[in-house]
Image (cartoon, helix red, strand yellow):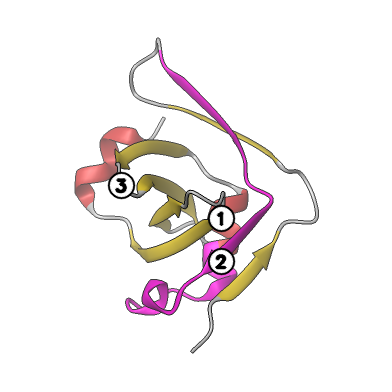
Amino acid sequence: MHPRRLLRPDSNQLSAVTTNPTLAYCSTILYVELLPSAGRHGVTEAEVGHAIEHLLAVEDAGDEPDRWLVIGPDHAGNMLEIILILTEEGEQLIIHAMPMRTQYRRLLP
């Protein structure tokens, strides 16, 4: 199965503030690939796309490869947790998507 591509034709500037008021994160997500592993928990491509476009929080989730946790709502307003990795080639790959677990509520504004 090939990765699915999510294109963002509108509003490419995304930003979120972490729970630490002295830290802010601003990102431009123009193009991401949704890997098959991201669908393991039943979250659809459309739901992931909506969550990325309307993200509310971003947190560093580790290195090698560079990983980011993204929290955003699906179309119904249910929060999703998404893991996005950044490759050395600059690709942005979504490897995980599922309903947000309670441990990440602390990230929400």
10 Å crowding of disc 3: few (<14), some (14-19), many (20+): few
Q: Which residue is mark 2?
A: 33
Instruction: Tell me how far mark 3 sits from mark 1, CA to CA.
Output: 14 Å
Q: Are marks 1 and 2 in contact (CB under 8 Å)?
A: yes
Q: Secondary structure at mark 1?
A: loop
* Residue 83 in the figure: left or right of residue 77: left
| Quadrant showing the C terminus | top left
Question: Circle 3 — which element?
Answer: loop
From this view, report whether residue 28 is shown above or below residue 5. above
Q: Could you tell me residue 20's position as x and y percent?
A: 33, 17
- Callout 3–callout 1 Cβ contact below 8 Å: no
Taking depth in this image into account, of 90 and 61 the one nearest to the observer is 90
Seen from the viewer's position, the closer of residues 66 and 109 is 66
From the viewer's perspective, is residue 76 above or below residue 44?
Answer: above
For this view, does 81 lie left or right of residue 5? left
Tell me the tag on residue 55: none
What residue is at 72 percent from the left and 56 percent from the top?
A: 8
How far, Cα to Cα, is label 3 from label 2? 18 Å
Q: Which residues are magenta?
A: 23-48
Q: Amino acid at mark 2?
A: Glu
Number of the label disc, if any, that sits on residue 64: 3
Q: Position of residue 88 (x, y in %)?
A: 48, 48
Point 30% across, 47% down: residue: 64
Q: Looking at the rendering, which quadrant does residue 63 occupy?
A: top left
Residue that mark 1 sits on: 91
Residue at 64% x, 66% y: name it. Answer: 6
